[in-house]
Image (tube, rainbow, N blue to C red):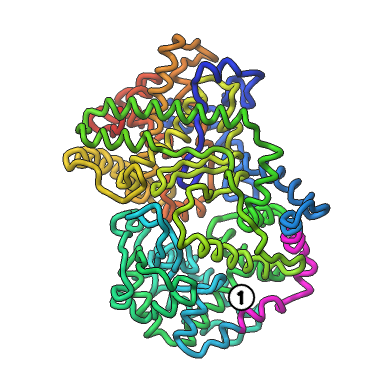
Amino acid sequence: MRRTALLALALASLPALLAAQTGAPRYQPWGLELKDMDRSVKPGDDFYNYALGTWLRDHPIPADKVGAGYNYDLPDEIEDQVRRIVEQAAATPTSPTASKVGDFYAAWMDDRAIEAHGLAPLKPWLARIDAVQTRPQLIQLMMRPGYAAPINIGISTDADDPTHYMADAGQARLGLPTRDYYLLTGEKYDAIRRAYRAYLIRLQDLAGISDAAAKTDRIIALETRLSQDQWTPEQRRDPVKTHNPMTRTQLTALAPEMDWTPTLAAMGLGGAAKVNVSEPSAVAAASKRLGDVPLSTWKEWMTVRFLSNAAPFLPKAFDQANFDFYSKTLRGVPEQRARWKRGMALIDDALGEAVGAIYVQQYWSPATQAKADELVADMQAAYKDKIDAATWMDDATRKAALAKLATFDPRVGHPKKWIDYSTLTVSRTDPLANNLAVADFQWRLQLQRFPKPVDRGLWYMTPQTVNAYYDPTMNQITLPAAILQPPFFDASADPAVNYAETGATTIGHEMGHGFDDQGRQFDESGRLRDWWSKDTAAKYNVQADRLANQFDQYEPIPGVHIKGRLTLGENLADLGGLETAYAAYRRYVARHGEPPVLNGMTGDQRFFLAFAQAWQGKRRDEAVRQQLLSDPHSPDKYRVNGIVRNFGPWYRAFDVKPGDAMYLPPEQRVSIWH
C-alpha cells in the first residue's frame, strides 16, 4: 500500500521532458523489472501474478517489516539519507533547531540511560492521573496532550467555510485498532483479545501496579462497551453525516457529561462558537460512560493507555511488550526494527520540517520541480478531456466539474514557509518528556492558527515522506520531494511506463479523489456542497455501487473480505486514474506515432504491465487482516486485478476473452471516465 490518501506523481509525456531524458532507467530494461514477471500465468487469469509472480514467489518479507515491495524499499533509501542529516545534527549542530534534532535523537538512542532511569520519567505523568478526584478534573486531564480520552477534541477546516478553522469532536481510537477487534466472533479474534488482556496486565506489572488482572478486566469491559457505540470505518467516510456543527446549547443537550464550556476553555478553545461533532451518537454514548462508569475505572483506563503509548520510551521490557502485541500479534512482524530506524520515524513526526529543510537543500533540485509541475499540468489536461466527453454528465454539472478541475492547487516538493520550532523544548536525556513536549507543541501550534484564516501553505507531510495526499477542503494535492524518484518517477523510462506508474497511480489517482464518492461532494472552493444534478448523481452512483459490490466479493485472506464501501473512494480513484492516464498516453502516441514493440510487448501492454508493477507489494496475513478491517485502501493485488478487469483497452491489449478467470462481460464492467 503506497499512500494513505494516495496521491503521488505522474511522469508524463511532454515532448520537452522526453527530449531531456538521459541515461538508462533505474529499473531495467525500460523502467520495469521483467524478471519479476511469471509468464506461465495467463494475463486474463491473474494479471497481478503475470506481472509480479516471480517476485512474489522469490522475494521474502524482511523479518522486521510488515511487508515488502516498492513502498517499503524507497522509504529505506530515504531513511538512510535522513539518518546522515540527523547524526550530523547530533554531532555538530549548526543552529538551535539542529541542536534540538540532535538532542531528540541522542535521547532516543541512549537506551542505557533509559534503563538506568527506570520508572522515574513516568511517575509525574501518572501522578496527575492519581490526583484526579472529580469528573470535571478527569475530563480536563483527558483533554491535555499526552492523555487518552473517549472523545477527541481538535481543530480542523470548517466544511461550510473552508477559509476558516473550526473546533471538532469525535469518537476516539481505543486500545485495539477498530471496533471489529472487540466485537467479531471466532477463535482468531478471541486469541487477539486474550493477547491484548495479557499485554495490559504485563504493562501494569512492569509499572508496579497492583491487582492488574482485575483492573484489566474492567478496562477491557469499558472499551468493549465504548466500541459497541462507535461508528464503523465505512460510516465515518460520509462527509455529510460526519458534518454536524453544534452550538454550546446543542452540545450540552447531546453530551452533558462533557461540561463543554469549562472543558473547551481549559483547552484554549473558549472562543469556539460552534463545534463540529463527527459521530454524534458515539459522542453521546461516550459522554454517558463518563457519567455512569466509576471514576476509578476511568483512572485505571487512562493509566494503562498512558503506559501503552509511553512504552517505546521506557525501559526495554515495556518496549518489548508493546512490540510483541502491536507488531508481532496484530501485524505478524517477528522482529523489532533497529532502534535508529524507529528514531527516524519519531523525528519525522516531532521535528520533521527541521530535517526537511536540510533534506531539500541536499536532495531536491529545481529541475525536478519543473518536470513535476509539467506532469501535473499534463494530467489535468487529460482530465479536462474526460469531463468534456462524459456523456452521463449534464451541462450544469460538467461546468461545475471543470471549475473544480481548474482550481486544483498542486504543491510540489516542499513548503514555502517552514515551521518555527523555537518554542519547542527538547531534552537530551528524557525521550518520554520529548515525546510529550512535541504533543503539547503541536497543539499550541493549532491554537495559534485557530482564530486566523486557514493557512493554505501548511503541509501535513514532510518533504522526506514517501507519500502524498489530496485535501478536499482545500482542493489541494501535495507531492513531497522524496517520492519524486524511481520507481515512481524516472525521466529515463519508457513513456508507457511513466504514464502508467505515475500518471495512473499517482497524479491521476489523486485528482480522481476530487471526484470520488467523498471528494465529489466538495466544490471548487473546498466547501461541502451538493453541486451535482440529481440525474447526473444517480448515474454516477450506479457505477459506484457496482464497483463497491465487485470489491465486496474479494477475499484476500480466508474469512475476511474487502469492504467495498470502505474502499470505494480509493477504488474509484484507481479506476479513474487508470482511465485518464491511458487516454493521456494515447494522446501522446497520436502525436509521436505508435511506439515500437520492446521485448515482445506493445506500448499498450507495457502500459498495463507498468500499472501492475507500480503496486508491487506483499504483506503478512495479520497485517492484511488489520488493513481489511480498517483501511480505505484495498490490498495491492486487488488495486490491479479489481481495476483492469473493468477497462476495455486492457482486454484488447492482452486478448482477454470469455473463459479467462478475470473476464467480465462488457455490461458488467464499471465505467467512470471511459
Q: Estimate how packed mark 1 is, as few (under 14), some (14 to 19) or many (20 or more) residues with alpha carbons within 10 Å.
A: many
Is residue 496 depicted above or below 668 in this figure? above
For the point 53% across and 46% down, which residue is it?
Answer: 619
Residue sitting at the far bottom: 133
Q: Position of residue 661 (x, y in %)?
A: 35, 31
- Please state which of residues 670 and 464 is positioned toward the viewer in this rendering: 464
Q: Position of residue 121 (x, y in %)?
A: 70, 76
User: For residue 236, what is the image quadrant?
Assistant: bottom left
Q: Is residue 239 left or right of residue 300?
A: left
For the point 53% across and 74% down, which residue is it?
Answer: 144
- Please state which of residues 173 and 203 is positioned toward the viewer in this rendering: 173
For the point 43% across and 55% down, which residue is it?
Answer: 630
- Majority secondary structure of magenta residues: helix
Q: Is residue 188 visible?
A: no
Q: Is residue 396 left or right of residue 631?
A: left
- Please state which of residues 578 and 8 is positioned toward the viewer in this rendering: 8
Is 615 one of the magenta-colored residues? no
User: For residue 98, what is the image quadrant?
Assistant: bottom right
- Please state which of residues 267 and 538 is positioned toward the viewer in this rendering: 267
Q: Position of residue 221 (x, y in %)?
A: 43, 78
User: For residue 329, what is the image quadrant?
Assistant: bottom right
**Residue that numbered label 1 is attached to:** 202
Residue sitting at the far front: 452
Secondary structure state at the residue bearing disc 1:
helix
For the point 40% across and 69% down, which residue is it?
Answer: 272
Q: Position of residue 140 (x, y in %)?
A: 49, 79
Is 120 one of the magenta-colored residues? yes
Residue type, label 1: Arg
What span is colored magenta in the figure? 103-127
